[in-house]
Amino acid sequence: MPPMRIFLLLFLFLNCLDNSVHAQSEHLSERKINQLVLEALSNFRQSNFEKSLIISRVALNHATHNKNNYLIARSYNIIAANYSELVEFDKAIFFYKRSLFYANKANNDSIKNMLYNNLGNIYCFEKKQYRVGIDFYKKSIELSSKIKDSSQIYFTNVNIAWSYFDIGQFSKGYPYLKFINAHQAKFQDDNTVVIANMLNGMYCSHKGDNLKADYYFQKAVSLGKTYIEKSDLAYAHLEYSKFLNRIKKDKEAYLNLKAYNKITEQIYNDEKLKKASIAGFNLELDEYKRQIDKIEDEKDSQYQSLKKSRIIVILFVVISFILLLLIITLIANIRFKKKHNLELVKAKEIAEEASLLKTQFISTISHELRTPLYGVVGITNMLLEEHKELSSSQHLSSLKFSARYLLSLVNDILQINKIEENKVVLESLTFNISDEISMIKNSLSFLSQKNNNKISIDIDPEIPEYLIGDKLRLAQILMNLVSNALKFTKDGEVEIIINLVKVEGKLHFLEFQIQDNGVGIAAVDQTKIFEKFVQVGRKDEDYQGTGLGLSIVKRLLGLFNTTINLKSDLGKGTLFTFTIPFEHDPEKTKRIIDEIQVDLTSNEVFKILIVEDNVINQLVTKKIIEKNNYICKVVDDGFSAIQLLGNEYFDLILMDINMPLMNGFETTKRIRQLGIKTPIVALTAFDKDEITDEAISSGMNDIIIKPFEPVTLFKIINYLISETKNVGC
């Protein structure tokens, strides 16, 4: 994109907006943030992209802390301009639209005017989507007229004329050139005079008036040499070269093309781009963290709203007890057969058959429980949202808590089953150990308050900021240990201590200590607490649990090739200790983070088709979708879905798997055979690992397990629709 356009837009943007923000924040005052924005702009105009991105990042962080939409929009705009110059146009568009989002919140037409112009530049000159780009330009002119910004109207006319000339539509571009020439004396400045002469040269060349064309091109080149900013001069040389080549002046054409290349190389060089890319990586990491923090805050607020009801819990505990009894019987039966077999081959066959039956049984039970649980949680949420007078009802809140409790029980059983069948594989994800521990502490704040406990954290400062490993399994281990300590401690303290004990190459060995001053564990019980379904020292009033937590901890640590140590005295407390090695590799961390998708929220209204045979689940899913202002239609089976898709367009399809007549996999295959590319997401109560292969082979794009968090559903919907549209472009 022509750098002149971005420089001028940012300049106009900063000069047409006032400096009326005064409030002081905890970190920097808004006046100082504004100074950072000006400094970032100055470095951008000098093509110092690395420094501009670094300073913009600092300004954005402080503006976000101050919740100043005006300054956030300004910071995002400069960030986007840098990415545009770094030829990362998709990222530039993303950050321009982020800036536009906050400009709308700030209700500032001057910022929006400038952003429409910038988006027009990218879509016209980089994405070659001229219709989209010119629409943005016209929006800019509308806003300029509204706020009576004549100089901006003049500048936008320059851009539109250039866009039309670029694609050879000189008749459409001429009215805008005529406007430029008529108002040149009043509004022309150093940033537009070179381009205005260049455009006149292009038009005269098109009309065959070679003498005038040569005059205007030479004037553009001559003026461009007198200004510090050289990007306009480069484009003047390029267009002059095209003209000279057309009239067969090959030598002069070559010299102008050579001048264009020389100026371009001076503006951009590999070292600048490399450093700017590193600065951009840090900035994108900040953006990712902000989205994660937002999601975690929403989860915490939802968790705090849950309350316990004894009557309804008893009902679900009875169901849980029956399920546990069946599973215990099945596991005991399998162990008995393995231990007392007489013939090795026959015993192996029996064990394999029993294992398959166990898996099928657990899968069936989990599916049959998740399906009604989805309805229970969904309808409870609907009642609480639609009837505010019921928000204080302990029965409804307890119903929701109990459903969540039973779902947690099902997940624990599935986790044990997966580990025992070697279906769990550790992943390599980058993470910050302090962030993970803080998340765990916040998640367990409700439980700590219940018993009036305090959670303290002590992390070795020598631990690197970013590590690589399976942070999800680590979080699961710590959540189980800390929650267990909180349950059996009252009016006390639970400490999370993490020390760096040794470094071997890229591996950093972290020792984790979870210590409490609770009731402790008797010596006779310490050897069996890691077994399944074992609970020691429990009284009737104690917190309800499955007895699977420590068993899961032991098995997960086995995946890390490590063990857990226990020290405990009755009445004094308990200490759990284990050590896990994590990799520290900055280059690998950067590669992993680069692959992370940014959050793709959208204000567009999408059209969603729900294929679901369960009437209650239809109601719940439709309510969740329409609450986000999406258009939604529901059909009962696959045949109806295929018939509807033949007559009507949808942005995305939510497909149930277990349906009569024709299941979700077969329905998806037939939809793909018709050439329909609409994204299809499986919305099912089956365990994800069981259906992933068949879902992918049938043509599905993703899988969501019921019950689910609505924020997860909408992130996947927005991402898939956005990805499909980008591919279509």
Image: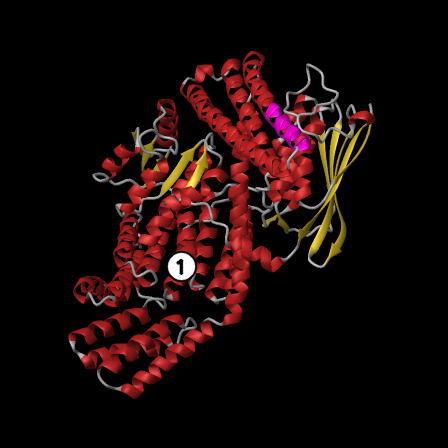
Residue drawn at x 39%, y 71% is: 231
The answer to which of 418 and 376 lies nearer the viewer is 418
Please count the marks in the image.
1
The answer to which of 56 and 577 lies nearer the viewer is 577
Q: Is residue 112 left or right of residue 536?
A: left
The answer to which of 256 and 339 lies nearer the viewer is 339
Q: Is residue 221 left or right of residue 334?
A: left
Whole-percent x, y for residue 629 in the image: 34, 33
Whole-percent x, y for residue 439 in the image: 61, 37
Dividing the picture into quarters, in which one does residue 2 lie? bottom left
Secondary structure, mark 1, is helix
The answer to which of 5 and 84 lies nearer the viewer is 84
Dot 1 surroundings within 10 Å: few (below 14), some, or many (20 or more)?
many
Q: Quadrant of the C terminus?
A: bottom left
Residue drawn at x 40%, y 59% is: 89
Q: Is residue 39 left or right of residue 637?
A: right
Label 1 belongs to which residue?
89
**Residue 478 seen:** no
User: Magenta part of the protein: which range?
Assistant: 328-341
Q: Is residue 331 magenta?
A: yes
Looking at the rendered structure, the kind of residue marked 1 is Phe
Main secondary structure along the magenta-highlighted residues: helix
Whole-percent x, y for residue 327 in the image: 59, 25
Model colouring: secondary structure
Residue drawn at x 53%, y 33% is: 359
**Residue 319 seen:** yes
Q: Is residue 513 magenta?
A: no
Whole-percent x, y for residue 548 in the image: 65, 29
Q: Quadrant of the N terminus?
A: bottom left
Instruction: Single out the residue that lies furthest toward the top.
Output: 311
Instruction: Single out the residue that lies furthest toward the bottom.
Output: 251
